[in-house]
Image: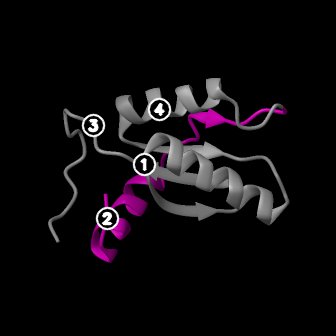
Amino acid sequence: MNLNKKQIQYLKGLAHSLKPVVLLGSNGLTEAVIAEIDYALNHHELIKVKIPTDDREVKQLIIDAIVRETEATKVQTIGKTLVLYRQSEEKKIAIPKM
């Protein structure tokens, strides 16, 4: 799903008060973590994921893999926190039109 600037700004505002619902552990990005992110996206639509690494290249590879595997849209990355959005069938978040 492609989002325009207005929609991304709206989602950033909604995500501001959220706490991370998925934290990557010492094992990194496993199938179980992908499944948990997928479940959280189905349930919430907009989530934060904490990626505990200081290496920018590794962090970007993890983000790319998460976005690819979950078919979600990256809203933003702040430090070690990734904000993801994927619309569910119930459409819990009404994002502004283009």
Magenta residues (range): 1-26
Callouts 3 and 4 close, C-beta under 8 Å: no
Give me the residue at 79% from left, 57% from top: 58
From the image, tell me which residue sits under label 3. Answer: 88
Position of residue 67 in the picture relative to residue 28 (left or right): left
Q: Could you tell me which secondary element the residue under label 1 belongs to? A: loop
Between marks 1 and 3, how big is the CA–CA gap?
Answer: 10 Å
Q: Could you tell me which secondary element the residue under label 4 belongs to? A: helix
Give me the residue at 51% from left, 53% from top: 83
Q: Could you tell me which secondary element the residue under label 2 belongs to? A: loop
The percent coordinates of residue 22 (x first, y second) are: 61, 34
The quadrant of the rendering that contains the N terminus is bottom left
Position of residue 78 in the picture relative to residue 90 (left or right): right
Callouts 2 and 4 close, C-beta under 8 Å: no
**Residue 44 colored in magenta in the image:** no
Nearer-N-terminus badge (1/3): 1
Colour pattern of the rendering: one colour
From the image, tell me which residue sits under label 4. Answer: 38
Nearer-N-terminus badge (1/2): 2
Q: Nearer the viewer, residue 46 or 26?
A: 26
Q: Could you tell me which secondary element the residue under label 3 belongs to? A: loop
Between marks 3 and 2, how big is the CA–CA gap?
Answer: 15 Å
Quadrant hosting residue 64: bottom right
The percent coordinates of residue 6 (x first, y second) are: 28, 73
Nearer-N-terminus badge (2/4): 2
From the image, tell me which residue sits under label 1. Answer: 72
Position of residue 1 in the picture relative to residue 67 (left or right): left
Give me the residue at 36% from left, 69% from top: 9
From the image, tell me which residue sits under label 2. Answer: 2
